[in-house]
Image (spheres, rainbow, N blue to C red):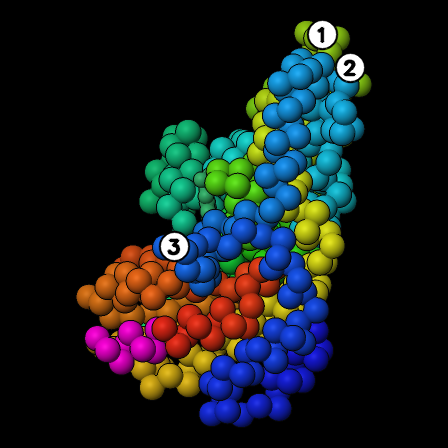
Amino acid sequence: MSELREYLDKITDDDLINPDHSVHLDNLDSLSNFRQEFHLPCKRDAEITYLCGNSLGLMPKRTQSLIAEELDVWKTRAVEGHFDHPYQRPWKSCDELVKGSLAAIVGANADEVAAMGQLTSNLHKLLITFYKPSAQRYKIVFEDNAFPSDNYALNSHAYLHNLNPDDALIRVKPRSGESTLRTQDILSTLEEHGNEVALVMFSGVHFYTGQLFDIPTITSHAKSFGAYVGWDLAHAVGNVPLKLHEWNVDFAVWCSYKYLNSSPGGIAGIFIHESQTQSQCQADHRRLEGWWGHDPETRFEMGPHFSPSLGASAWMVSNTPVLTLIALYASLQLFDEAGMENLRAKSVALTGYMERLLKYSKHYTDSSNVEHKQFTIITPSNPSERGAQLSLKFNKDYMLFYNEQLQIHGVVGDDRKPEVIRLAPAPLYNSFRDVHKAVSALDKILDDF
Ligand SMILES: *Cc1c(COP(=O)(O)O)cnc(C)c1O
């Protein structure tokens, strides 16, 4: 991957727009073969330039054959598939298949992660455990303009505790004229409210701005005030390097259909730090329990008392949805082969390349006051403060129109009201040529309209 960086470093911006460089960069990319592992979407027989893996990841080719195998086991063995499986993936413990890969991706021990449920419902489960407001300590600090589902979830937990969300929730806002949050402002909010804060809950990468928060600094600061700290990693998992165990994060949730390509609505995941998995439930027994969280050794004795599994698995409730678990397994094999470090190195080069091409466009402005035929980038320019995604801000009267035009030109990003188009080159399957095509299309659209 250092070849990519060296190549990019030696080319000037006015030379970089030459598409030949995108071909050279693809040749230097040691992960370029992974593109062939995916089905690339088409429209009217033309391949699409897909920069929307932050919303729904593409389908790995091997997903189809792995799911076909499971359907075949169901067809031919029915209930026996739980215990006796021709491909050694007995359904009763199939969640074990993905633990090692998930742990590597989020920087955890295998016992600290579990594949289960879906993001928002998992968040509810972990808020039951980790949001324990008292009369003095009941506030939740999180980001303003959070993803709506997280906002609804946190509000509803305030109501469950008979609290007024307007009082219980502290939303940290960007400074006026700025789009992203300063770490300093998050830390000083924590200082201001110190001992009132029960929980700090942020997204790892913000869905609208693409900002990657400083997870270790915010976590350690919040913990020094005695708050619990949780992260919603929907846009971070499989995108940026994570070390949840080392950073002492209490808990995290994520979905896996974005960068992890697990299928639409695919099975989600949780992390609970090992220092919490034991202590949390002994003291006050705040956990929603079900038979799949029971110790698997004795689960099928069907006894009256709950005996928890080791680690995060004790928070599992229902038996594993095999088809989506296997779809996740298919994609995680590719992550294992590619390695998160390599993916991140390529991602930094790929998104940096996109940023340089965009900023070279005559339609780019660095003013936050964006006019017709213009755009700016609200995602931080520092690679350590972002993942793959760049959020392009347009004039709000034109944003939807420009995104429609991009689709007509075969480029798929997505719009987020009021004024953003998100473009996210996923390093597992996107190429430098994809990025060049997308930026040229945008440039032409802005020339024409
Ligand atoms: C994508 C996303 C979700 C999705 O929630 P589901 O429960 O999977 O539907 C939630 N939160 C954030 C921050 C997201 O980006």
* On screen, residue 290 above or below 430: above
- Kind of residue indicated by mark 2: Thr
Left or right of residue 448, residue 349 in this image: right
Q: Quadrant of the C terminus?
A: bottom left
Point out the stretch of residues depicted in magenta.
Answer: 442-449
Task: Please rate how many residues cluster around mark 1, counting C-alpha atoms within 10 Å: few if below 14, some from 14 to 19, many from 20.
Answer: few
- Kind of residue indicated by mark 3: Lys
Q: CA distance from mark 2 to mark 1?
A: 8 Å
Q: Nearer the viewer, residue 216 or 347?
A: 347
Query: Which quadrant of the view contains residue 413?
Result: bottom left
Q: Who comes first in sequence, dot 1 or dot 3? A: 3
Left or right of residue 125, residue 373 in this image: left
Residue 43: mark in rendering: 3
Identify the residue at horizontal 59%, vertical 48% (top origin).
Answer: 60
Identify the residue at horizontal 54%, vertical 51% (top origin).
Answer: 39
Give the labeled residue for mark 2.
298
Q: Are marks 2 and 1 in contact (CB under 8 Å)?
A: yes
Give the labeled residue for mark 1.
303
Residue 404 position in % (x across, y down)? 28, 61
Q: CA distance from mark 1 to mark 3?
A: 54 Å
Task: Please rate how many residues cluster around mark 3, counting C-alpha atoms within 10 Å: few if below 14, some from 14 to 19, many from 20.
Answer: few
* On screen, residue 222 above or below 28: above
Q: Who comes first in sequence, dot 2 or dot 1? A: 2
